[in-house]
């Protein structure tokens, strides 16, 4: 379980986050949704300590993360898997080396074991025969999938995904959603997914936080999001032709 | 004010970099990789510049010492001295600041703006130790070899110039480069080289490491890395010369 308490962040005179408090439960997929530029990525980075919040605290299973020094954070960070919005693969390493990288740094596994683990993770994101390619030789969606494979290679206790299926075709996006949900349950992870994809919201939104203008505007789950009477959230949810059809009829 | 900010942050980066690495074996491998990237890749340019530099120094000496009062072996002696004391350690270090410094700054800058440095940090790896330290250590280990090679090639270049132009006899030149040799001069040159190597790697790493923005800023960081490490080299050169030759 991860708790964020009263997180605020300002860049210059732009308030990006204002008093955001949220509890991210173990074993379910927690979604953070919101329009582009609303501070989802910044919130995620505050949670993992890459951006220092001006105010507020973060607890990882009751461990006061935000008060720790870099060296103390290390311990928790080795339990974190993170998918960055842009992938953040290491340019100088091949696909296989990228996925094995955390294993090389933190485990005493033999090269054979590491390779097996890497291949297993790559197969879970439907990637085969790309082991020896460099990130610059991959398509955008492939990079994203390699990054997911790297994020899960250590079997993290906490998984953060910033837009895991943006740039993917609907089938692969669905596959990634399924994968995230599956491993979350399988390993009892605390999973946080940032997304603005309504398909994902309705598929894996076991807990949903909606950010609007730097504030936590609404929270709920995939069942009650369609019945919300929150105007801003309605505008976010019922935009596409498909989701408009899901809109409950007034009085019906 | 701005200088103090950067200098303070530079020192703090150095302090972060010099920490116990995560895994010794990987760290050693990183150093070897960097020695190849930063050192071996520069052998060609250092060699070419050195030969020509030595040739020019010898020819200029020959023109300037155009009097029978000074023996012509002086040309060999002076060429050797200039090369060892100043040309090889300082000029070649400046060349390396251009070549190696821009490489380091743009590599780290790109890693910063594409969040690769954040990715390391999130894994629980100290990015400064992992990325910056091997570059500094590798430069400090490999640059003395490059500079040593440069000294030999420059003196050789002077000899070739003599043969090619006929301005001074080969035997006199060879006698000259063996005369009045002090081991301390080599020591002085090596100290300078190692200090300059540290400056090149750390100053350009600093410029890359804190890049903000995108491709444009990476280019800027790379230029700044070269400019500031060159300025620092020139400045340290003055100080070290004062200290070591006083
Ligand atoms: N390092 C930074 N310096 C200054 N402003 C920043 C910085 N990072 C983010 N911002 C600002 O914070 C706001 C929120 O950015 P953020 O990246 O969190 O958006 P987002 O919700 O993730 O959007 P998207 O869905 O497009 O990824 C933006 O207005 C952005 O300009
Ligand atoms: Mg974002």
Image (spheres, coloured by chain):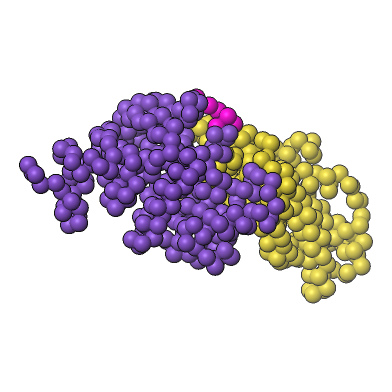
Measuring 47% from the left and 39% from the top, which residue is drawn there? A188
Say if A64 sits above or below B186 in the image.
above
Q: Quadrant of residue A42?
A: top left
The structure residue drawn at horizontal position 37% and vertical position 37%, both measured from the top left corner, is: A43
Residue B138, x across and y down, in percent: 71, 49
Residue A82 appears anywhere in the view: no
Q: Is residue A70 magenta?
A: yes
Of residue A81 and residue B170, the one placed in the foreground of this image is A81
Q: Position of residue A54 (x, y in %)?
A: 39, 28
Taking A64 as reference, is B79 above or below it?
A: below
Magenta extent: A67-73
Q: Quadrant of the C terminus of chain B?
A: top right
Principal secondary structure, stretch drawn in magenta? helix
* Number of callouts: 0
Q: Residue at x 41, y 29 (%)?
A: A3
As displayed, is residue A40 above or below residue A167? above
Name chain A's colour: purple
Residue A241 spot, x, y in % from top left:
17, 57
Between B232 and A38, the one lying in front of the other is: A38
Q: Is residue B213 magenta?
A: no
Question: What is the x, y in percent for residue A134?
Answer: 55, 63
Q: Is residue B105 left or right of residue B187?
A: left
Task: Locate residue B204 relative to residue B41 in the image: left or right.
Answer: left
Q: Is residue B186 visible?
A: yes
Q: Nearer the viewer, residue A118 or B51?
A: A118
* Chain letter tied to yellow: B
Q: Residue at x 92, y 61 (%)?
A: B175
Q: Is residue A88 left or right of residue A104?
A: left
């Amino acid at each position: 379980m991860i708790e964020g308490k009263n997180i605020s962040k300002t860049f210059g005179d732009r308030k990006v986050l204002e008093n955001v408090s949220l509890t991210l439960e173990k074993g379910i997929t927690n979604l953070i949704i919101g329009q582009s530029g609303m501070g989802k990525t910044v919130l995620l980075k505050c949670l993992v300590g890459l951006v220092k919040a001006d105010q507020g605290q973060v607890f990882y299973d009751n461990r006061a993360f935000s008060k720790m020094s870099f060296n103390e954070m290390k311990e928790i960070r080795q339990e974190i898997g993170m998918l960055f919005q842009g992938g953040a693969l290491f340019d100088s390493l091949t696909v296989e080396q990228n996925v094995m990288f955390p294993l090389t740094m933190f485990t005493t596994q033999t090269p054979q074991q590491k390779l097996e683990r890497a291949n297993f993770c790559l197969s879970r994101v439907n990637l085969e025969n790309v082991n020896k390619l460099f990130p610059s030789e991959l398509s955008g969606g492939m990079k994203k999938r390699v990054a997911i494979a790297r994020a899960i290679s250590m079997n993290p206790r906490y998984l953060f995904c910033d837009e895991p299926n943006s740039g993917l075709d609907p089938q692969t996006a669905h596959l990634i959603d399924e994968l995230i949900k599956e491993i979350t349950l399988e390993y009892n992870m605390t999973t946080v997914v940032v997304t603005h994809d309504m398909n994902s919201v309705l598929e894996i939104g076991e807990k949903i936080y909606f950010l609007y203008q730097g504030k936590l505007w609404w929270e709920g789950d995939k069942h009650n999001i369609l019945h919300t009477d929150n105007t801003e959230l309605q505008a976010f949810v019922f935009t596409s032709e498909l989701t408009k059809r899901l809109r409950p009829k007034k009085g019906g | 004010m701005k200088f103090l900010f950067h200098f303070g942050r530079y020192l703090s980066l150095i302090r972060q970099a010099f920490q116990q690495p995560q895994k010794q074996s990987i760290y050693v491998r990183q150093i070897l990789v960097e020695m190849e990237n930063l050192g071996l890749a520069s052998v060609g340019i250092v060699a070419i510049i050195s030969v020509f530099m030595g040739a020019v120094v010898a020819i200029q000496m020959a023109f300037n010492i155009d009097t029978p009062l000074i023996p012509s072996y002086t040309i060999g002696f002076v060429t050797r001295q200039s090369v060892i004391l100043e040309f090889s350690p300082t000029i070649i270090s400046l060349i390396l600041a251009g070549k190696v410094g821009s490489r380091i700054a743009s590599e780290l800058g790109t890693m910063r703006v594409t969040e690769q440095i954040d990715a390391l940090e999130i894994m629980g790896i100290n990015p400064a130790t992992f990325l910056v330290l091997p570059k500094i250590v590798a430069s400090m280990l490999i640059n003395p070899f490059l500079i040593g090679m440069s000294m030999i090639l420059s003196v050789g270049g002077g000899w070739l110039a003599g043969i090619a132009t006929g301005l001074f006899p080969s035997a006199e030149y060879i006698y000259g480069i063996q005369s009045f040799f002090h081991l301390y001069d080599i020591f002085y040159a090596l100290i300078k080289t190692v200090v300059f190597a540290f400056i090149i790697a750390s100053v350009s790493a600093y410029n890359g490491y804190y890049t903000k923005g995108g491709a444009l800023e990476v280019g800027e960081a790379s230029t700044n890395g070269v400019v500031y490490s060159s300025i620092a080299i020139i400045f340290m050169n003055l100080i070290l010369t004062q200290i070591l030759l006083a």
